[in-house]
Amino acid sequence: MLDLIRHDDILELRLARPPVNALDAGLIRALRDAIEAAPSEGARGIILSGRSGMFSGGLDVPSLLQLDRAGMAEVWRDLFGTCAALARSTIPTVAAITGHSPAGGAVLSIFCDYRVMARGAYRIGLNEVQVGLVVPEPIQRGLRRLVGSYRAERLMVAGAMLDSEQALAAGFVDELVDVDHVVARAQIWLGELLALPPRAMGETRRFARADLADAFGDIATLNVDEFVDGWFGEESQRVLQGLVAKLKSKA
């Protein structure tokens, strides 16, 4: 479900869970482990990528609806842990957004250093409200850091999905390239960064990203029960079950 590809000292983590790279409990945990382990395994930079046309479809709602409260709490802890691992990574990270990136896919990209998105009719956004979920405060803080407080408010409250040009104009992503060149462009950007004097670049980067690293505080103290309560709440379950029914009708 996760391909680890080395490009010299750059590690590409390619989501490989067909058909849409949906984030289930196993993939979220695998991502967290790989991001946390990368520096000790000799990587100097990380690229997160997906398949052409699809970065990630977000949370795997059908599989997560099968979990009990304990299982869902573990998923939330790992999701927050994955975001924190990106935010606090001692090596730079780039999201190679190779296609559509709703909800969880967009969340992953927010906590990277840089975002290269495929040009075209691909969409990205935090559409959690549309599927009955609250956007957690640490994730809201990450989007506000990118696009500004008011614009983040408008996007998140509406659950808006932006096409690639709109995302670039809003500051949600940093640049657009043809879909076949997204990963290559991410490599080039990382290579240019890694060519800088390493101590000066690394320490400056650490100071500059301190606010993002602090967004999650101590993962163990986050009120995971609050998000689990929300997931199992009547409104969320009704909307999520309706979403699953709609997906089944299209299958």
Image (cartoon, helix red, strand yellow):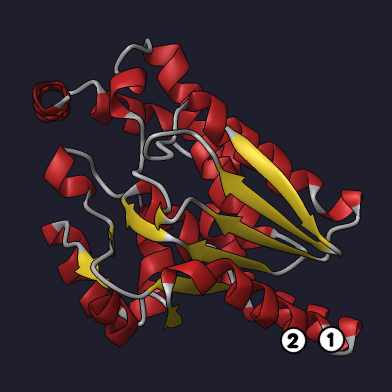
Are the two marked residues, 2 and 1, in contact with CB atoms closer than 8 angstroms? yes
Secondary structure at badge 1 equals loop
Which quarter of the picture shows residue 167? bottom left
Residue 225: name its quadrant: top left
Label 1 Cα neighbours within 10 Å, binned few <14 / some 14-19 / many ≥20:
few
Query: In this image, 151 relative to 22: left or right?
Result: left
Judge by depth and name the residue closer to the eye, 59 or 54.
54
Closer to us: 88 or 97: 97
Label for residue 192? 2
Place of residue 140 in the rendered image (x, y in percent of width and height, measured from the top left): 35, 60
- Quadrant in which the C terminus is drawn: top left
Q: CA distance from mark 2 to mark 1?
A: 5 Å
Q: Measured along the vertical axis of the image, is residue 150 above or below residue 250?
A: below
Quadrant for the N terminus in the image: top right
Q: What number is the disc on residue 195?
A: 1
Badge 2 marks a residue whose secondary structure is helix
Using residue 42 as the reference point, say whether residue 206 is left or right of it.
Answer: left
- The residue sitting at 36% across, 36% down in the picture is 59
